[in-house]
Image (cartoon, grey):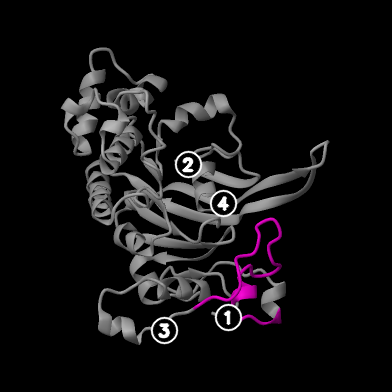
Amino acid sequence: MNEAQKQSVIDILNLKMYFPINRGLLRRKVGEIKAVDDVSFAIRKNETLGLVGESGCGKTTIGRCILRLYKPTAGKIVFNGTDISKMKEDRIRPLRSQVGAIFQDPYGSLNPRQTASTIVGMPLIVHGMAERGKYNERVEELFRLVGLDPSMMDRVPHEFSGGQRQRLGIARALACQPSLIICDEPVSALDVSIQAQIINLLENIQEQLGLTYLFIAHDLSVVQHISNRVAVMYLGRIIEITNSRELYANPLHPYTKALLSAVPVPNPVIERTRTRIVLKGEVPSPADPPAGCHFHPRCNLATTECTETKPMLRDVGNGHEVACLKV
């Protein structure tokens, strides 16, 4: 990895995102939902960081904080050397052209009343990048880049298949030539065969354009294929982060081990010899998370220390970081 690749595109430092719980006639604050609770990580240039975990663990909230759709409760979001966490709206808008977003639902994320060319080209208009005489040329270029025929530009979303709609979403995300793209479960609503096409497309585009991805997903097989590094989240916290090969070969946190044990293996001989780890109980509420380690009520290794002490991410060698007192 050269020096340029080692540079961070984005650094998340002690990020917190709490949502107030208001009740009563006067809507008094009676509590808060700790969606993201003291999260730190960095994404290097040209890297794909996979962010995995159960539904409701805070993955999408982190993506929305980076896009500044949410203003973080605390912490820093340093994008290309600039802290955008508390930046005012009039200053944050120009920076948004440098961050693209691909959404989960290719059916709900496109305006059904707009043509495909308008959908793809709208970011160029919003950010004042639609040069006179070159707008249509740029939109056609984006269509070809994602594998769509420019002759389809005048169609509306319902005339496209699910995979084609997601390609439109990818083209829209690429319109302003961003350096970072937030991929929020971009293949979870697609058929398996189409998933592979979209993943391969994202990898090819990354290689062509030198992009950096934050890839949010709950499908560990997809994350393994596309990610350079993987961060595992549980109840608002990152509990393990390392390179993809190391995580799948040598998971250290009990929660990560349980997640990986649930991933089916296509080899029936290996599948019969594997031990399935079934977690007890339910995920606690983010409005009232457990003290100490958030995972301790469901962990078979938990001790009294785990109920009292918050484990911090620590490097156990080769860049493998884990937040567990028993590792």
Q: Nearer the viewer, mark 1 or mark 2?
A: 1
Q: Nearer the viewer, mark 1 or mark 4?
A: 1
Q: Position of residue 169 (x, y in %)?
A: 33, 37
Pointer 3: what residue? 275
Residue position marked by numbered label 4 in the rendering = 13
Residue on which the image places disc 1: 326
Badge 3 vs badge 2, beta-carbon distance below 8 Å:
no
Which sits earlier in the primary sequence, circle 4 or circle 2? 4
Q: Give the alpha-carbon distance from disc 1 to disc 3, as whole Å.
A: 21 Å
Quarter where residue 289 is shown: bottom right
Spatial CA distance of label 1 from label 2 is 34 Å
Q: Tell whether label 2 touches label 4 (CB within 8 Å).
A: no
In magenta segment, residue 297: yes
Q: Do the residues labelled 1 and 2 touch (CB within 8 Å)?
A: no
Q: What segment carries the magenta color? A: 278-304
Mark 4 and mark 2: Cα distance apart in space? 11 Å
Instruction: Tell which tag, 3 or 2, sits nearer the viewer.
Output: 3
State the residue at coordinates (26%, 48%): 198
Query: For the residue marked with disc 1, what is the amino acid?
Result: Lys
- Give the amino acid type for the residue marked by disc 3 in the picture: Thr
The label shown at residue 79 is 2
Kind of residue indicated by mark 2? Phe
Question: In percent of the image, x 37 and y 71: which residue is there?
Answer: 263
Q: Is residue 125 above or below residue 108?
A: above
Label 1 vs 3, first from the N-terminus: 3
> In terms of secondary structure, where does tag 4 sit?
strand
User: Who is closer to the viewer here, 185 or 281?
Assistant: 281
Q: Report x, y in % for residue 261.
A: 41, 76
Q: What residue type is labelled 4?
A: Leu
* Left or right of 132, for residue 80: right
Quadrant of the image for the C terminus?
A: bottom right
Q: Earlier in the sequence, mark 1 or mark 2?
A: 2
